[in-house]
Image (cartoon, rainbow, N blue to C red):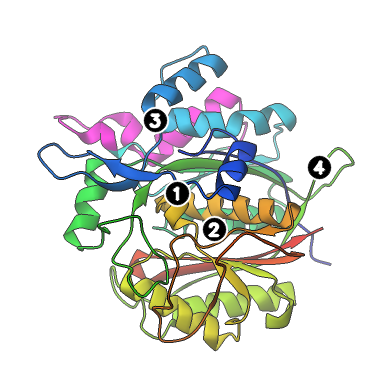
């Protein structure tokens, strides 16, 4: 019999708040972290979701004595701290870090390569700080990293290698990231509009998030979500462009739902990737329709948080679980008129709903796609 794996705790650090309750309250009120920011000198401000550095520093100083950490590391440590305090770390506990760029800001104006810019060094630094006894695992696979990290934890616990895992995900806004997306002409000129007819690009965001995953439930857990199915497929379509037929995402969803043994009719809610670029949203609409999921309530959180790269999948999974616990669906902000060739059931306002099965999806550069099915226990 396959071992059942559960998410039983989580936390997040975002522009909307430094814990889940403050984020949930802001989302219910329709607040967005996206605003105009001047990131690159001598360039026009653009819309992004950025954590206030002064507030971050104050929050970190309140919680930690050691201040010898980068800005991104501080975000990640703040997200992890409550979980580490509530759960034991043993020789059978994994630490998994999801990030696409890590401390890439350290490269600015450097003649030599700083050690902390290596993802493995960054992960080890955090693992050592909290006293993890196993070698940390880094998941860095473009924008599916956060969803894949959940799947990696699930599969490694099922294999018997670990009994539980702490998964942390984080990325920050940097000149490098902004320059890259600018080169694709992918950055929107306003707060993004996923799936809308007038969408014109993404907003970059930053966040950190963390979850605790285990095979052993106990009576002290306030909630549990079974990771019922997962899959990651690379359709090798293009270095940056999504498949026009949605092949990779379709196969990922199909595999995850097959493992979870759920039909399209049983899925109660889809937390989609929804970057608000022309081709990503179109590809997703095609893939969801191919799976007969076009009538399932769906949202994208990108107009609240921006695209948080390696943190997006984990953060959005956390918010989807919070939705299930509160029996409330959050609208896909800024959606007014369908802008995809195939219809989707986009959530337009806060609404009450019984949510048992959640489908979370993500897609990224290089043709990577991932999906997980979460089941509220």
Q: How busy is the neighbourhood of tag 4: few (under 14 within 10 Å), some, or many (20 plus)?
A: few
Please tell me whether the stretch drawn in magenta is mainly helix, strand or loop: helix
Label 2 belongs to which residue? 147
User: Which one is nearer the viewer's eye here, 191 or 144?
Assistant: 191
Q: Compare marks 3 and 1 and give the one earlier in the sequence.
A: 3
The CA distance from mark 1 to mark 2 is 16 Å
> Which numbered mark, 2 or 4, is in the foreground of this view?
4
Residue bearing mark 4: 222
Residue under numbered circle 3: 52
Q: Which residues are magenta?
A: 105-134
Q: Dot 3: what SS?
A: loop
* Res 202 quadrant in image: bottom left
User: Pointers 3 and 1 in contact (CB under 8 A)?
Assistant: no
Which residue is nearer to you in this view: 177 or 323? Answer: 323
Answer few, some or many: residues within 10 Å of disc 2's Cα (few below 14, many 20 plus, some between 14 and 19).
many
162 left or right, relative to 274: right
Work out which quarter of the rendered image holds the N terminus and state it. Answer: bottom right
Q: Which of the two marks, 2 or 3, is nearer to us in this view?
A: 3
Residue ID for mark 1? 305
Secondary structure at badge 1 equals helix
Mark whose residue sits in front, 1 or 2: 1
């Amino acid at each position: 019999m396959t071992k059942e794996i559960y998410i039983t705790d989580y936390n997040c650090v975002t522009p909307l708040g430094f814990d889940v309750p403050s984020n949930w309250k802001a989302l219910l009120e329709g607040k967005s972290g996206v605003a105009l920011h001047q990131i690159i000198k001598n360039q026009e401000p653009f819309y992004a979701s950025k954590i206030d550095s002064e507030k971050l520093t104050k929050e970190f100083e309140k919680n930690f004595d050691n201040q010898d950490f980068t800005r991104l590391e501080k975000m990640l440590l703040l997200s992890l701290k409550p979980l580490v305090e509530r759960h034991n770390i043993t020789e059978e506990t994994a630490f998994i870090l999801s990030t696409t760029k890590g401390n890439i800001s350290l490269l600015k104006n450097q003649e030599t390569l700083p050690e902390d810019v290596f993802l493995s060094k960054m992960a080890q630094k955090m693992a050592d700080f909290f006293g993890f006894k196993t070698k940390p695992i880094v998941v860095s696979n473009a924008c599916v990293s956060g969803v894949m990290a959940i799947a990696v934890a699930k599969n490694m616990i099922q294999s018997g290698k670990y009994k539980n895992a702490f998964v942390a995900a984080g990325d920050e806004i940097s000149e490098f990231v902004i320059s890259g997306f600018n080169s694709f002409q992918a950055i929107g000129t306003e707060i993004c509009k996923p799936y809308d007819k007038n969408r014109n690009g993404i907003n970059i965001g930053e966040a950190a998030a963390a979850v605790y995953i285990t095979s052993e439930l106990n009576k002290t857990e306030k909630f549990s979500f079974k990771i019922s199915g997962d899959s990651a497929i690379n359709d090798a379509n293009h270095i940056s462009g999504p498949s026009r037929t949605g092949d990779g995402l379709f196969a990922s969803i199909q595999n995850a739902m097959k493992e979870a043994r759920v039909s399209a009719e049983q899925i109660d809610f889809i937390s989609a990737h929804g970057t608000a670029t022309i081709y990503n949203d179109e590809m997703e609409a095609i893939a969801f329709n191919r799976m007969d999921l076009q009538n399932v309530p769906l949202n994208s959180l990108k107009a609240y948080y921006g695209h948080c790269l390696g943190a997006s999948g984990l953060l959005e999974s956390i918010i989807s679980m919070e939705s299930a616990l509160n029996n409330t669906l959050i609208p896909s902000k800024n959606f007014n008129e369908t802008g995809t060739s195939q219809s989707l059931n986009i959530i337009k306002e806060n609404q009450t709903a019984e949510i048992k099965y959640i489908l979370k999806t993500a897609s990224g550069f290089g043709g990577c796609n991932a999906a997980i099915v979460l089941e509220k226990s």
